[in-house]
Image (cartoon, rainbow, N blue to C red):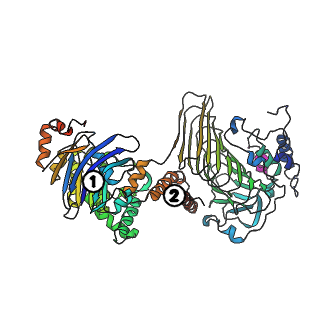
């Protein structure tokens, strides 16, 4: 709620004065609304309950530039991230702007529309849903994206349409000298009985400072299925603030898997809102962090109708002085009976200086529900390490194997083969780098 | 092959002495059984020989093939040919039996100068060993001990022993929790694996295992010491009389046991 107190202008408020230089007026209505919301919303700080464990001063203090040029990069820097399954179903964005050269669409079959949002501003579904599904109240980041975004992903599947290939959404961030802010945007509408797999990847090409604020709106209509994989491999100095929200209708399924590897500071707020009975959804996460990384996940699973099955396994490995925060809200509204909801947050601490804050939060107003939840924080079990050592593995190798095994469970359900393999490689790279004590120079 | 001399052991950092001067000599080709009541230090002895980091040797030595192994890590002891079958085998979700064993086999092979096997060669090798403990090949693709019944876990330990071919195997209560059929399978497996160049130490509460595996020597541990040693007939005597008649041997010179 807007307060009568004066809004202290943050870097986002200041930058808002520079509307995008080429700022078209195709999003004028959204920009105008977002500007009003931004101007009446305070930049978050630790006295706000939802932000008490996450220090945003590094963002507040960064002198972001309103200029966002694409910088320099080679074709090979980009092409190496292409997955073979999406040879003709790939959208590439560089610093939040659509890149036609590297994108390749047209291999998705009948009834599937894919492209850059800005080319679809007159589309009836874009008009109907864009910025109307997003529901992050009092959030300067969402409002800032609404004010500044230009391009984005648009995916629409007609009734009964099945995408013939997974859609790869590559968000690349270049090694620009000045810190910039990218505002990726995404709208996915799956009509009745449609089916699509989306691989959303965020990759920093260098080690520079930037902030990306991906906002994603998903509508899953009756009996439709969406499999959504989100990989965050941002630069080690980047800030990543994401707001993906999905609305699930009767008999539909939405399964989301978020893998957090990069960024100095990330705040991921996935939300799923049930719109009718008989739905099935997943909000799984895997976080592998090290050094001084901070990875924060605040999720919401909102059960509003009867007969839902929901699942959330959030696994975290922390090394060095890294800090993980998890707050998983599960709402079961009064009329939502026969809900079967599972939530588990398991944290593995590899170092003594690592920190984990975890808070499962169940608010149940119905009386006939099955909700299980659990949170554990622990180290590698010395008995397990000894067992593997007694079978010939060095202590280092034993720790690597056990960490790898801990992390692997969460990516088992990623069904695109090359992505499953690349995630295994990422897990392997992390465990290999983190199983031995750090040598300090 | 293995010589344990006046071994005193404490739990690391707790100052409680568990082994109070154990002496034991195991020669090549022999089978030894160590028996004794709960809490007598049998399992501790096995873990200390395998190098468990929880225990601290405060006095004495463990000599293996003529050299002290006290400074060796558990993996180095395994490379040298030692093997411990765990009383409570650990579940390792996410790592298949096959992966663990190939990794172990090749690491040990490399350090003992044997030829390493590629996945296909290893597959042939491991399948022969499955028959030895009557295990289904499905076991290979299952995560190590995860969701296994108690009996399956124990059989898996003997299967690992079959694959790794240790020179000295310490089997810590491998017979407990087994039904009579599983006990026979496990015992047959151990008998087939034993030959004149390796040695086996059976740690057990019960005489029944010794109906299947005939030991050359039987030792009784009470209060952190070996209080009596003898031939296989000692096991039968224990079965008949229990351990009470030996309790007094655990206190020497008025020292608490």
Q: Quadrant of the C terminus of chain B?
A: top left
Residue depicted at 65% across the width and 65% down the height: A81
In the displayed structure, A53 sits above or below B161; it is above
Decide if residue A217 is in sight here: no
Q: Which residue is mark 2?
A: A436
* Pointer 2 and pointer 1 on the same chain: no
- Density class for disc 1 (Cα within 10 Å; few <14, some 14-19, many ≥20) is many
- Density class for disc 2 (Cα within 10 Å; few <14, some 14-19, many ≥20) is some
- Residue A118 sits in which quadrant? bottom right
At which x and y percent is residue B254?
Answer: 21, 35
At which x and y percent is residue A132?
Answer: 77, 43
- Tell me the element at label 2: loop
Residue range of the region highlighted in magenta in the rendering:
A123-134
Instruction: Report the front residue among A406 and A369.
Output: A406
Q: Which residue is mark 1?
A: B170
Residue depicted at 20% across the width and 62% down the height: B28
Circles 2 and 1, Cβ within 8 Å, touching? The answer is no
Task: Using residue B74 as the reference point, say whether residue A148 is left or right of it.
Answer: right
């Amino acid at each position: 709620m807007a307060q009568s107190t004066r809004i202290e202008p943050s870097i986002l408020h200041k930058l808002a004065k520079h509307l995008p230089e080429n700022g078209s007026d195709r999003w004028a209505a959204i920009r105008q609304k977002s500007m009003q919301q931004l101007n009446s919303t305070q930049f978050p700080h630790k006295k706000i309950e939802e932000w008490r464990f996450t220090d945003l001063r590094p963002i507040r203090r960064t002198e972001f530039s309103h200029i966002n040029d694409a910088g320099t990069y080679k074709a090979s820097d980009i092409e190496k991230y292409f997955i073979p399954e999406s040879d003709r179903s790939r959208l590439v964005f560089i610093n939040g702007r659509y890149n036609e050269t590297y994108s390749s669409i047209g291999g998705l079959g009948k009834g599937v529309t894919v492209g850059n949002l800005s080319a679809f501003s007159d589309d009836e579904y874009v008009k109907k849903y864009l910025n109307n599904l997003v529901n992050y109240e009092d959030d300067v980041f969402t409002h800032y994206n609404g004010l500044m975004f230009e391009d984005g992903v648009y995916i629409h599947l007609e009734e009964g349409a099945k995408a013939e290939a997974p859609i790869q959404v590559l968000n690349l961030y270049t090694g620009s000298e000045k810190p910039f802010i990218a505002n990726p945007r995404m709208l996915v509408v799956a009509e009745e009985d449609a089916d699509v797999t989306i691989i959303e990847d965020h990759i920093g090409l260098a080690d520079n400072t930037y902030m990306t604020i991906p906002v994603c709106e998903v509508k899953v209509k009756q009996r439709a299925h969406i499999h959504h994989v989100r990989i965050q491999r941002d630069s080690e100095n980047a800030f990543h603030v994401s707001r993906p929200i999905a609305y699930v209708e009767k008999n539909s399924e939405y399964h989301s898997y978020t893998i957090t590897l990069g960024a100095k500071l990330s705040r991921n707020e996935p939300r799923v809102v049930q719109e009718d009975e008989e739905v099935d959804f997943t909000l799984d996460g895997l976080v592998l962090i090290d050094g001084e990384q901070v990875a924060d996940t605040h999720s919401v699973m909102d059960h509003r109708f009867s007969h839902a099955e929901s699942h959330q396994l959030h696994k975290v490995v922390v090394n060095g002085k890294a800090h993980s925060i998890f707050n998983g809200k599960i709402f079961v509204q009064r009329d939502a009976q026969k809900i079967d909801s599972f939530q588990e947050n398991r944290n593995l601490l590899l170092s003594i200086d690592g920190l984990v804050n975890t808070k499962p939060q169940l608010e149940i107003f119905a009386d006939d529900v099955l909700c299980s939840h659990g949170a554990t924080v622990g180290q590698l079990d010395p008995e397990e390490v000894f067992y593997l050592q007694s079978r010939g593995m060095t202590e280092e190798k034993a720790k690597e194997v056990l960490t790898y095994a801990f992390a692997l469970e969460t990516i088992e359900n990623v069904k695109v083969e090359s992505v499953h393999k690349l995630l295994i490689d990422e897990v392997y790279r992390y465990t290999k780098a983190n199983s031995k004590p750090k040598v300090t120079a | 092959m293995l010589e344990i001399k006046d071994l005193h052991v404490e739990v690391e950092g707790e100052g409680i002495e568990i082994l109070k001067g154990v002496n034991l000599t195991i020669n090549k080709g022999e089978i030894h059984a160590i028996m004794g009541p709960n809490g007598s230090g049998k399992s501790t002895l096995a873990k200390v020989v395998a190098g468990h980091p929880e225990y601290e040797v405060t006095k004495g030595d463990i000599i293996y093939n003529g050299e002290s192994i006290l400074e060796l890590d558990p993996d180095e002891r395994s490379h040298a040919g030692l093997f411990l079958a765990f009383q409570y085998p650990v579940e390792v979700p996410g790592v298949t039996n096959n992966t663990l064993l190939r990794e172990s086999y090749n690491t040990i092979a490399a350090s003992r100068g044997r030829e390493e096997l590629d996945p296909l060669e290893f597959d042939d090798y491991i399948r022969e060993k499955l028959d030895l403990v009557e295990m289904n090949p499905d076991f290979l693709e299952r995560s190590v001990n995860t969701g296994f019944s108690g009996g399956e876990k124990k059989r898996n330990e003997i299967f690992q022993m079959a694959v790794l071919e240790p020179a000295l195997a310490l089997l810590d209560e491998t017979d407990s929790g087994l039904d009579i059929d599983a006990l026979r399978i496990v015992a047959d497996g151990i008998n087939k694996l034993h030959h004149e160049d390796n040695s086996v130490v059976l740690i057990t509460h019960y005489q029944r295992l010794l109906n299947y595996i005939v030991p050359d020597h039987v030792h009784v541990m009470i209060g952190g010491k070996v209080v009596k040693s003898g031939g296989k007939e000692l096991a039968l005597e224990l079965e008949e009389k229990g351990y009470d008649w030996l309790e007094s041997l655990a206190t020497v010179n008025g020292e608490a046991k």
